[in-house]
Image (cartoon, grey):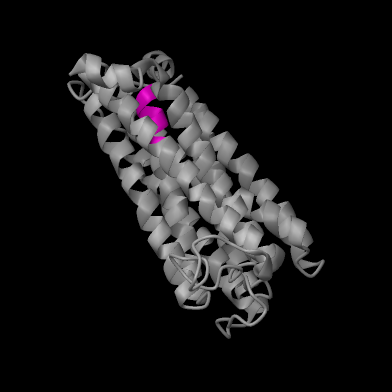
Amino acid sequence: MTRFFSGLVPARYLRNLAVANLVANILIVVTGGVVRLTASGLGCPTWPRCTEASYVAHSALGVHGVIEFGNRMLTWVLAAIAITCWLAALAHRASGGPNGTRAVRLSTLIALYIPAQAVIGGITVLTDLNPYVVAFHLLVSMLLIGLCVMLLDVIKHPDTWAAEEPVRASATIRRLAWLVFVVGWIVLWLGTVVTGSGPHAGDLDSRRTGLDPQVWSHVHASAVYLLVGLTLGILAVSHRQRLTGLRTASAALLTVELGQGVVGFVQYFNDLPVPLVGIHMLGASLTAAGLAWVVVRAQRIRSGSSATATKSRLR
């Protein structure tokens, strides 16, 4: 069995494939943003076919058809990476690699979410880009990014995920990390509310939520302020306790949040220019990754261990 899986995809490639999984899932959010921002959301007006008579785009659909169909084809690339990563995880487990079962479970979830996302994407087309379905489609992508981060952490830090060792974070760290995570996801959700009420619908004729985008932009910004404050808090605690891994994750998340804040304010006061909105979507993906990184690193701290030991385990 070991030879079989290793012959398909050697276990030594698992870490690189986990990174590729993460990068690909972030990039497809960006390309999905390109579809929406170029009003190409209905470039292929039906699903699973592009038109009633064809599975591929044709010249009559113009550039919008090319953009939408191109994004659909990227799903196959995503699926290929996910399946290859899953095979490498099987080889890793079969060869007795650390946390092999966890790696297989996570890579399986990721691989299964890809076709589920394709179906949700199809529903967005069939509902003429209903803003609530579009928002759900984006948030599922954010969840996928979080799973990819967890898989990568399992592979990179096998000692802190060892099932035979008791793993328990201090209550303060654990609760603060989950609070950052929950507020961060509220921020991401509020971002979809703002988007659903704004001008970039994905198609010129697609309906909006009818909510006041200015009001919800302020609500979204207020949640961001809270998130930044909480992130500063967990960064301070991790620095004081010399928790290197958590401190690195918190600092990275804070950097993304501050960058997102700058982009958000600039785009708000400049009538949402398309390039900045695209950058903001990339930032949202990185925020989802950062939130997952923080909460995972916080959960892998052993209570009762010395600061030096904890520091070495979380590098």
Dividing the picture into quadrants, the one containing residue 68 is: bottom right
Q: Please identify the quarter of the rendering in which residue 136 is found.
A: bottom left
Residue 42 falls left or right of residue 299: right
Q: Which residues are magenta?
A: 149-155
Figure quadrant of residue 38: bottom right
Q: Position of residue 194 (x, y in %)?
A: 60, 71
Q: Residue at position x 38%, y 17% from top?
A: 313
Query: Is 301 situated above or below 136?
Result: above
* Residue at the image position 65 percent from the left and 59 percent from the top: 66
Closer to the camera in the image, 172 or 141: 141
Height in image: 61 above or below 241? below
Q: Is residue 111 above or below residue 313?
A: below
Q: Is residue 212 left or right of residue 127?
A: right
Q: Residue 184 in the image: state x and y as whole percent.
A: 49, 54
Query: Is residue 164 located in the magenta-colored stretch of the structure?
Result: no
Q: Residue 94: x and y, percent?
A: 21, 19
Residue plotted at (62% across, 49% down) = 282
- Membership of 151 in magenta stretch: yes
Residue 276 versus residue 292 in the image, above or below: below
